[in-house]
Image (tube, rainbow, N blue to C red):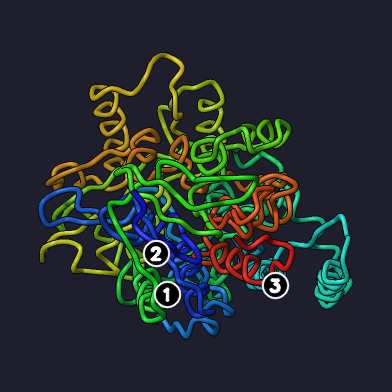
Amino acid sequence: MTDARFDAVVIGAGANGLVAAAALARAGRRVAVVEAADALGGQSRAVEFAPGFSAPVSVDSGWLLPSVSRGLGIDVARVSPEVSVTVRHGDGFLALPTAPERAASIIRAHSARDAARWPAFAGRLAKLAGFLGALYQAPPPDAAVTTLSDLASLAGLGRRFRALGRVDMSELLRVLPMSIQDLLEDEFETPWVRAAVAAGGVRDIRQGPRSGGTSFVLLHYLLGAPRGSVRARGWWRDGPAALADAAAASARDAGAAIRTSARVREIIVRDDAVAGVALATGDELAAPLVISTADPVQTLLGLVDPVWLDPELIRAVRNIKLRACTAVVHYAVDRAAVHPSLGPAELASVVSLTRDVDTMERAYDAAKYGTLSAHPHIEITVPTARWPRLAPSGTHVVTAHVQYVPREPRDGPWTDARRAELEGLVTAEIARAMPGFAGGILHRAVYTPEALERTYGATGGALTHGELTLDQILFMRPVPGLGRHATPIDGLYLGGAGSHPGPGVPGGAGWLAARAALSDKTRVHR
């Protein structure tokens, strides 16, 4: 059964899918969006995990490309953090304010040397992250220059690079491939200062702080952060899914049709060209253009018949690093469970429970062998400090992001008993830092990587849709040859976090994929 013909179908109604749909619809295309879940928002949607308590899987609102805001007329109010990061120290916590001078005054009580270095360090990170931001606002440069537009893209990249100046050009080339531990040991002597920053370099990646390229991960997730912040980037004032809601409104205003509870069974291909999608219900939506915001493995190896793909491409896609390593535990707690030294500004930011970089590295060591460390790296966020309506008055939602948790443990699959064991370990670690925490728990929900895969449809539970390793960024994301969003199948484009510019830039990949599809003069229109 065929529902209707469209000019384009977008798979997924997270920020990337809704931005892509809005861009296509505003360009005059008749667009349908299909979403497997029963609600919009993707990873930003708040999911009820206990009666009256809801939380998104991530409270990081990311960085909205200026071109998306301008192009779609989206203006989403943002709140800037007062505290960049809080880290466990002694029997309490130390918070680093976003303002560099205030942060330096906190550090000075522990190291005059580190305090003197902090403002310049924070400013340098902001400048280097800004260069990445310039790269992320356009299709990635193509090393195999074949057209004048490709040449212009490379020339533009060169101009931006030279604009950094000689000193910062050298610093960028030095920092990007470095391990975050090496970067921080060059700068600071205080263990808790190193730990506070280092955690940003291993976010959702199965690498430890001694691994090369983790300094790049830190810079990537600084895009959109206020100057001086080395971790927190702020949040949408009106809720975790505010950007997705605004993009959905823009798409609907331009005539796009959005369907939830509509799981795609297959991307239909005929004669090397897209012909539409088939839903699990048996319905078919015919269209000569499909933008998929599912991860590249799910799109190309799960939804497309492999007969249409080159074996070398199939092998490359199979080798994409989707090594999920993060579990999430949501807690519903009474307010007394939170440590008294953590005020509203600290709770609205990110709180790291790892005191030093060596402990973080040991947690990673366990994951390499398919086991869970006795002391995993845990960061907590409190979504209700930003959006109180996510829980009843007098209570909080505390979300623990736990690294490194293997997708497939060496000694057997995840069971209810093993999930309970994980939750007990995480609760005990939090309680060591906040002694009243365990007694204040009202409800809890555990999402191991395999549970995240079921809930959010991400292969292997990798919410990044592909780790941000140096071989999986820019024109190599998701794999060389697919870095500019088009695939070898005419009319099929990749627009999810597994494509350039990657996770943490909501709507960015969807916008660039839509622009690529609209400007592709070589595509056969059927």
| Residue 219 image offset from top left, x and y in percent | 63, 60
Name the quadrant containing residue 511: bottom right
Left or right of 143 in this view: 391: left
Name the amino acid type tagged 2: Ser
- Mark 2 or mark 3, earlier in chain: 3
Type of the residue with mark 1: Glu
Disc 2 is placed on an element classified as loop
Which residue is under mark 2? 349
**x then y, percent, for residue 178:** 74, 48
Q: Residue at x 74, y 48 (%)?
A: 481
Query: Which residue in the structure is indicated by mark 3?
Result: 134
State whether residue 319 is above or below residue 17: above
In this rendering, the count of numbered labels is 3
Q: Nearer the viewer, residue 448 or 460?
A: 460
Q: Earlier in the sequence, mark 2 or mark 1?
A: 1
**Earlier residue among tags 1 and 3:** 1
Instruction: Say which residue appears at 65% left-offset and 53% top-offset.
Output: 490
Q: Residues within 10 Å of mark 2 (few under 14, many from 20)?
A: many
Which image quarter holds the C terminus? bottom right
Residue linked to disc 1: 82
Residue 29, given in percent of the width and then of the height, sits at 50, 73
Residue closer to the observer: 241 or 292: 292
Crowd around label 1: few <14 · some 14–19 · many ≥20 (10 Å): many
**Alpha carbons under labels 1 and 3: distance apart:** 26 Å
User: Residue drawn at (56%, 60%), measured in percent from left and top?
Assistant: 221
Q: Viewer-proximal residue, 321 or 425? A: 321
Residue 381 percent location from the top left of the image: 34, 56
- Cβ–Cβ under 8 Å for marks 2 and 1: yes
Residues marked 2 and 3 touching at CB (< 8 Å): no
Residue at mark 2 to residue at mark 3: CA–CA distance: 26 Å
